[in-house]
Amino acid sequence: MRILAWPYVGWMGFFVVVPLFLILVYSFTSGDIHDSSTWRFTFDNFARFNEPIYLKVMADSFVLATTSTLFCLVFGYPVAMIIARADLRYRNLLLMLFLVPIWMNFLLRTYAWMSLLSPNGLINRFLLLLHLPVLEIMPGQGAVLLGMVYNFLPFMVLPIYTVLSKLDVHILEAARDLGANGFVAFWKVIFPLSIPGVVSGITMVFMPAVSTFVISALLGGGKTPLIGDLIEQQFMSDRNWHFGSSLSIILMAVILISMAVMSRIDQNTEVEGGKAK
Amino acid sequence: MMKFFKRFYMSLIFLFLYAPILVLIVFSFNSSKSRSQWGGFTLKWYLDMVNDRQIREALVFTLVIALLSTVISTLAGTVAAIGIHYMGRGTKTAILNVNNLPVLNPDIITGVALMTLFISTGIPLGPVAMLIAHIVFSTPYVILSVLPKLRQMNRFMPEAAMDLGATPMMALRKVILPEISPGIISGALMAFTMSIDDFVISFFTAGTDATNLSILIYSMAKRGVKPSINALSTVMFITMVVLLFIINHKSEKGEELLL
């Protein structure tokens, strides 16, 4: 039976490992992208990243991704909790209602926000009608943030919901019996137990948010390019694969470091939970 | 009080989630081309959608790529998963770590890495490259959804079948496959929806002559999307929702299928 896996291993070697290796090679060389005989080893591509414009792009991406992850957590956690605690009859329906929007093309949903948020779009018409001040976030970082929260919220809610729905209700009852009020029971019992879901939610939101180029291209109007826009530009229009590859390596490093930090948090809480026993 | 608050909160969240979708659907019936002005009810965009060659070609292309990549990645993924299941622990972990790379890497990295590979090895960007790319990113999901089913299966069952005279092929077909079929089906569904929905990886591997729906929408988005695209997405969205409700209704474990 084992032999069945080997063709796929070969396939993965060629289509998963080799491409990433190529990116690594490109990132440490310079020269004509199509002629490998001109390539020389260099750190220049990484040194170039040190320029203020690129550092600002990285900082913007990191701040926007972190902020949108926080928003998703703050708004998503209650949703996960409400669905998990809902009556069994409604639970599947609520979950499904929450997931159905994913089935509309991601670009179209983002495009719809463009028309909702534009200076004379529907939201502003509505605000004008009520004599309220108009929103001026499109195009700009505010709109990008909204687009990120909108598109990635389900990735936060699902893992938290999964953990919360498997939580033993008796634990909560025990906490209440022992005198904890609702808030204490949540903060000392439910939240710590849901950390694994929170951690995977944070990773699942942060990763696409920090690497997106579509949302910033459509809702940001090119005013605040993110690292994803920069990579796309290097590969598609500037044809500087060497610099583009080094940016990709930096992006992967940022994600790997964030994931390592998150899994540390996950492990730490498990240890604490162990001690408490 | 608490109940009211919960309902209010959920309504706000659902309003936020559905507002853009409602806008798309409503404006697919709007006789004015504007994205914010209502000009009266019309069905002309639905007619346009059927007659528009560009949209029709992109739709057919998207569906063909999705079907092909689903069939190939489901077959390959199931076969590979069975092989991986019987591997020793060390090899299994190593293979699964590589298998996880396309799942964990951001799409843009997978996209540019594949594009670099295709150009360096002389595989022209276009439909074939895009199909390969879709198989590359969907097979890992098929494997990840088939493996747990293999783990749940009683490992003596195939052996028992073979002791009773079944050939390995028969054991595979009559014992293993029926046991793991829920995993195969959910893997195939995942592969299909991911292929239909993918933009980023397609964008980098399409070259100039391959246009799927996502790429078409992206190229239109900056100038203004044709209302007939709204009509098409309304049709696709409603088809998906109806299918979902049917699947959910038929299976008690609808929740699992949906995810």
Image (tube, coloured by chain):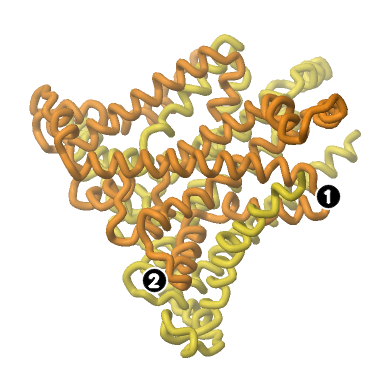
Chain colours: A yellow, B orange
Q: Residues within 10 Å of mark 2 (few under 14, many from 20)?
A: some
In-image side of A248 versus B95 (left or right):
left
Residue B48 occupies quadrant: top left
Q: What's the residue type where badge 2 is placed?
A: Gln
**Residue A89 location, x and y as percent?**
57, 9
**Residue B212 location, x and y as percent?**
32, 47
* B237 shown above or below A146: above
Give the residue displayed 37% in from the left and 62% down from the top. B125
In-image side of B126 versus B50 (left or right):
right
Give the residue displayed 46% in from the left and 68% down from the top. B116
Q: Are marks 1 and 2 on the same chain?
A: no
Q: Is residue A195 visible?
A: no
**Residue B41 location, x and y as percent?**
11, 22
Q: What's the residue type where badge 1 is placed?
A: Arg
Give the residue displayed 46% in from the left and 73% down from the top. B120
Quadrant occupied by the C terminus of chain B: top right
- Using the image, tell me which numbered label, if any, was put on residue B17: none
Residue named by callout 2: A234
Secondary structure of residue under mark 1 = helix
- Of the pair A17 and B20, the residue shown nearer to us: A17
Q: What chain does mark 2 sit on?
A: A
Residue named by callout 1: B89
